[in-house]
Amino acid sequence: MKSASVIIPDKFYFKIGEVADLMGLPTHVLRFWESEFKRIKPKRTSAGQRLYRKQDVELILEIKHLLYEKKYTIPGAKNYLKDRNAQHNPLAPTYNEILNELKAIKKLLE
């Protein structure tokens, strides 16, 4: 779901200003999205500077697409990303499946 006009350089880490320039967004928007979308987790230098990984930049690009082009709300974009991740891993057990399995194991041990 990458926008054709954005080419992400092949680097390991990006500073917040570099990501802002790539996306055409102010840095405060990136900081806000970081607080709203918990999957955006830039590393921090000892001086506290954010270093975004390429996967963070790709996720930010997708979020921008959802919010600006598809006109999703932030909660809508969160749900979309959550549902998409669940669909990509259909074998991942749900909370209730894990809980039921643990209860069954506990019964066996009693």
Image (tube, rainbow, N blue to C red):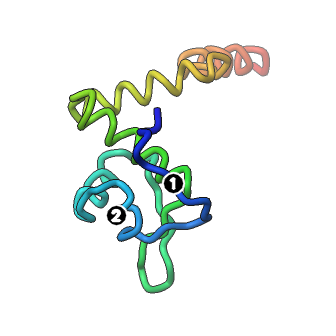
- Disc 1 crowd rating (10 Å Cα; few below 14, some 14-19, many 20+) is some
For disc 2, the neighbor class at 10 Å (few under 14, some 14 to 19, many from 20) is few
Real-space Cα separation, disc 1 to disc 2, in angstroms: 11 Å
Quadrant of res 48: bottom left
Q: Which mark is residue 70?
A: none
Residue 28 lies, in percent from the top left, at: 23, 63
Q: Residue at x 23, y 62 (%)?
A: 26
Q: Is residue 74 above or below residue 24?
A: above
Q: Secondary structure at mark 2?
A: helix
The spot of residue 64 in percent (x, y) is 32, 42
Q: Residue at x 26, y 57 (%)?
A: 25
What SS does tag 1 mark? loop
Is 85 displayed left or right of 69 in the figure?
A: right
Q: Identify the residue under disc 1.
A: 8
* Amino acid tagged 1: Ile
In-front residue for pair 82/21: 21
Classify residue 108 by image quadrant: top right
Please provide percent x and percent y for residue 53: 54, 59
Which residue was labeled with disc 2? 21
Three-letter code, disc 2: Asp
Q: Nearer the viewer, residue 62 or 6?
A: 6
Q: Nearer the viewer, residue 102 or 95?
A: 95
Residue at x 55%, y 50% (from the top left corner):
55
Q: Is residue 41 above or below residue 48?
A: above
Whichever of callouts 1 and 2 sits on the residue coming sooner in the sequence is 1
Residue 71 figure quarter: top left
> Furthest residue to the bottom?
47
